[in-house]
Image (spheres, coloured by chain):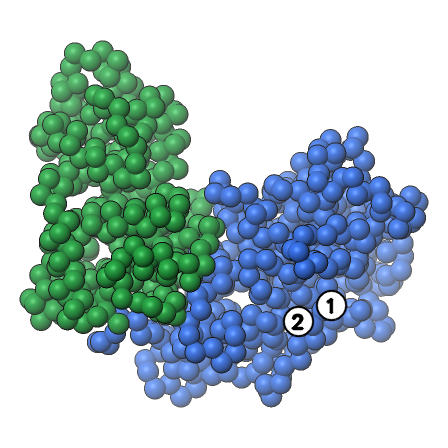
Chain colours: A green, B blue
Amino acid sequence: MAANFYDSSQAKFWTFTKPELANIRQEQEKTNPQLFAKHPMPDHRHINIFLQGNLCKLAKRMALRQQPLATAQIYMKRFYTQVPFQRTNPYLIMTTAVYLACKMEESPQHIRLMLGEAARQWAELGVTESGKIGECEFAMISTLRSRLILHHPYRSLGEFSSTLGLSPEEQSLAHNIVNDSYNTDLPLLHPPHVIAITAIFLAVVLRPANSQPAGLTAHSTAHTPVGGAGAIQGAAMSGPAAQSALAGIGIWGQGRQVGQQRLAKLVDWLADSRVDMNAVIDATQEMVSLYDVWESYNERSCKEAISRFMKDSPGK
Amino acid sequence: MNSTPYAPHRHINDHYDIVGFISSGTYGRVYKAISKRNPTVPQTKPTHPDGRPVEAFAIKKFKPDKEGELQYTGISQSAIREMALCTELSHPALIHLVEIILESKCIFMVFEYAEHDLLQIIHHHSLLPRTPIPSSTLRSCMFQLLSGLLYLHQNWVIHRDLKPANIMVTSKGSIKIGDLGLARLFYKPLLPLFSGDKVVVTIWYRAPELLLGSRHYTPAIDLWAVGCIFAELLSLRPIFKGEEAKQDSKKAVPFQRNQMGKIGEVLGLPRKQDWPLLVAMPEYPNLQSVSMHNPAVSRPVGLDKWYRNTLSNQNYSQPSNPPPDDSALDLLRKLLEYDPLKRLSAEKALEHPYFIGEDGRGDGKGLPSWNCFEGLETKYPARKVSSEGNEHATGSLPGTKRSGLPDDSLLRPTQKRREV
């Protein structure tokens, strides 16, 4: 638990291998063939981007902090491994996840306030009684098997950033990349420190050319990484060994003296640590492909896909 | 498959037979239960982490906030904490959670059943003819309690409500810390601990820094409570049995003058030369008023004398049951240390000579046992479980109930057999 990630329920019960996760999703489709045939969904990363964007709007309205928001996103990710997305009211699930996460992260919000703010944010919510959130909370806790304590990459990110002496811009970019990682499956696949290292790695390699506003999410950063994306992807795929991947990226950073020094330091540090480099490479690829997918994200088509199945079965 | 994704997965009555009622409080009730005798659905035999089957269960049922409430009102933060922490934590000296069932607006937390608790054991010994708790039992209880507490603190959890009634003892002599309803994580909190719950820890076991209004507190508050429990196991009555000043309507937390006075009667009032940060405590200006209301604090008994009086009042007559030696007094003194920075940590307490002796191996007594009843002839009476469901919610004895919590209104179960 808090002392050791590998003893936590997150490590023991809510971390999957890729085939396991793929299998879970296939099973869901197999047991609900009509639902999935009638309501095909966009790429699940597009859905995640949509959900994150909406959660951020609610968080802004309620002046919530990063941590409960991240926790809410993980609750939803886990919930949707057990329940088909199209069977729910995603707006109610978002509201409930935030409500529960705020309690868990010691910044509780009153259930009626929660309902009021969510209803003002989303006309689609369609819920007028706070009891519905309470009922959904029961279902969510039950589905998550009461495993509500989470480990996020932010803690490791802070520690590693100071160890490596990252610049404020790099730190802020790494932080935004971690925020973006919540749109991928990474939180269900890798320990939080792997995601933190991946974010630092990307931040150092892709160093922000000009400083960008650090919002709750880095989706503004989506444009910057794409430039370097090909280079990383190529490097990482060319060989499984960390060294070759890192060497490949080193070339990309040529001509930028400071960056190279930092990169060299990072490479040394990674070599000394006992970090699972294959996991870092895999996570790097996931992030790069997220930014690729982000290019074709369309908010409206996600919203419409959701309202179509909600009209069909109001997700009660 | 269910058409609604929100239906409960398991039903309490499919898996358990309630055999009796244990206690009640405003949060709900605790029942004793066994595995379903005539099950209609497939059963899995619940086991302890070590593989032993769980024979009996204590089921804590949280009722909806208002009786007869037709709506879900949202689960209290306290219940959420207890559910999440009990699910996450696992240690031999911590009560084992079997499962949680959420069904028809109620939460059922299913725990392993423990036959006794420390309050019950203290009570048993204080019945006439009074007998002291055997030294070996005492030492084992303290050792196990501190081991469990070390585990909690290593996992960044402060219990915040340690007292004899919350420390269970199984029939095999294992100590099990229970009731994590007030416990919480203290790793880099988003808000200071104070702002969440203005009042923590039952008054008799509340650490001086809390009594003095400290905004930031640490796991050391649990060690003060352990010191109080140690003293109570020795003397069979609470060492600092004060009266709680009630919160007024404006939610201002009053200064606990009476409780501070009770501590002062034994230890004397805290002084800034012993506790440098004392003057920074919000209630420091009120400290002087304690001696005006309670002149005894100016002539404190002193912990040494308290200890000697206690031992001589106890009936340590039989040669088979020698009293604890002075290392017990030394441990007690270091737990009941005013300055939280100087107070022993759980880790240091476990290295104290009281447990490991001067030679590190227990000085011939051996290291403390994980069975606090080892070598004992007496058998403690089993917990009283009433078959009829009539609950005696006796209310307001400070040793038994939890003080008012601004973040929710969950109270501790009231224990019926509390000696006053």
What amino acid type is highlighted by mark number 1?
Answer: Leu
B143 up-or-down from B124: above or below: above
Query: Is B275 left or right of B266, judged from the image as shown?
Result: left
Q: Residue furthest left?
A: A37
Q: Earlier in the sequence, mark 2 or mark 1?
A: 1
State the residue at coordinates (42%, 71%): B72
What amino acid type is highlighted by mark number 2?
Answer: Thr
Query: Is A33 left or right of B193, judged from the image as shown?
Result: left
Q: Which residue is mark 2?
A: B414
| Residue A151 showing in the rendered view | no
Q: Chain of mark 2?
A: B
- When asked about the image quadrant of residue B375, the answer is bottom right
Q: Which residue is mark 1?
A: B397
Across and down, in percent, residue A4 comes to 42, 44
State the residue at coordinates (15%, 14%): A254
CB-based contact (under 8 Å), mark 2 and mark 1: yes
Q: Residues within 10 Å of mark 1 (few under 14, many from 20)?
A: some
Across and down, in percent, residue A166 comes to 33, 23
Disc 1 is placed on an element classified as: loop
A123 up-or-down from A314: above or below: above
A173 up-or-down from B336: above or below: above
Across and down, in percent, residue B339 comes to 72, 38
Location of the C terminus of chain B by quadrant is: bottom right
Question: Looking at this view, is B6 or A197 the one in front?
Answer: B6
The disc label shown at residue A248, or none: none
Question: Looking at this view, is B31 or A222 the one in front?
Answer: A222
State the residue at coordinates (23%, 15%): A260
Looking at the picture, do discs 2 and 1 lie on one chain?
yes
Q: Chain of mark 1?
A: B
Location of the N terminus of chain B by quadrant is: bottom left
